[in-house]
Amino acid sequence: MLIIDAHLDLSMNALQWNRDLLQSVYTIRAQENRTQGKGRALGTVAYPEMRRGRIALSIVTLIARSTGHVVPNIDYASTAQAYGMAHGQLAYYKALALQGHIRMIGDLDALQSHMAEWRAWDAAHADATEETPPLGFVLSMEGADPILTPDQLGYWVEQGLRLLGPTHYGPGRYAGGTGVESGLTELGPPLLREMSRLGVLLDMTHFSDRSFWEALEHYEGPVLASHNNCRALVPHQRQFSDEQLRVIFQRNGVIGAAFDTWMLQPGWVVGQTTNEKVTLDTVVDHIDYICQLAGNSRHAAIGTDLDGGYGREQSPSDLDTIADLQKLSGLLAKRGYSDADIAAILHGNWVRFLSDAWR
């Protein structure tokens, strides 16, 4: 079964974490065996494992915050630094494309031809160790801080940007994010209007509750949540309430289930709680909740965030690498989902969402 993963921070891992993702997960773990830090020697994502897991398409990020709260390798002291880092991350993806490892997908024709090639390959190759087509990447930005002003968005679109989540953790330049109660800043509404004008898709992930509702007043285009879970199952501001999920349904949006265990187990304490009680079936709980709330399988999908600054210690306990996403087919089938529903959840809903938006 082909899979689309709607949220991977690949360039951050390659540049800030200095990981050569062309090598296998196991080689990178060995290289990091003596490297200190959370997630080191425990990574789950690299390109060989993505190919083995038949992850035909991913939404990949540029991420460089400038919130006024400096955090090494992610939150920079000035907007100029964030701007520069985002360009470095963009250059990394472009280099991979020039080398033939990946292809950037930015319009309907490219999406259709890419998925057709992968479907043909999938039908002809039961053994996932065979050489696959290039991995497909759709470019997103997680937190709009590198965009110096709203009227600069057109430049980033020219560079390939197709989706944008205006904020991340804390008080972003454009909107309040996870962990704060503030709404849009004065820069937020003009950015959202420019997104509508240019057809940049709005990723609602990481909005504060106030920002979430304010953003919908200023943005008229398609919305999604690339990596988000359900507040009814894990009560936390980072998850979305039923009311928030329903408004995404109403706009024909899609929600990608996230795999970070603190978003899967209530009361998780980073650095203390362990992942024994969290499995891939726990992820399916959130997928199933969205399907039951919507009354269909059209809005549930995958957005793992498996490389978002952690590793196996903060992933489902029965997941070794991203290739294990293939286990989801069987788990969904055990819940009574049909083959058509499973295909929709694992890739079809994202294909439909992007196709409708780009058509």
Image (cartoon, rainbow, N blue to C red):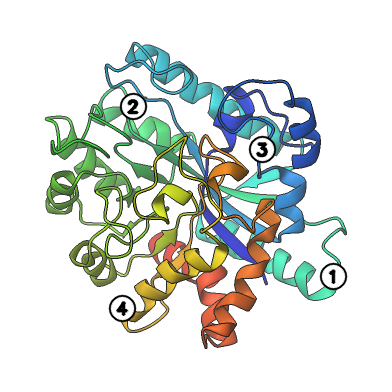
Mark 4 and mark 1: Cα distance apart in space:
35 Å
Q: Amino acid at mark 2?
A: Ile
Which quadrant holds the C terminus?
bottom left
Per the rendering, the mark at residue 42 is 3
Residue 294 badge = 4
Q: CA distance from mark 2 to mark 4?
A: 35 Å
Residues at circles 3 and 2 in contact by the CB criterion of under 8 Å: no
Q: CA distance from mark 4 to mark 3?
A: 36 Å
Q: Foreground mark, 3 or 1?
A: 3
Q: Which of marks 1 and 4 precedes in the sequence?
A: 1
Residue at label 1? 125
Q: Which mark is residue 147?
A: 2
Residue 141's tag is: none
Crowding at dot 2, Cα within 10 Å, few <14 / some 14-19 / many 20+, comes out as many
Instruction: Give how far across and how far down residue 142 sits, in percent.
Output: 40, 38
What's the amino acid at mark 4?
Ala
* Left or right of 185 in this view: 135: right
Task: Determine whether the residue tagged by mark 2 lies in a helix, strand or loop.
Answer: loop
Residue drawn at point x = 51 percent, y = 39 percent: 308
Residues 252 and 247: in front is: 247
SS of the residue under disc 3: loop
Q: Nearer the viewer, mark 3 or mark 2?
A: 3
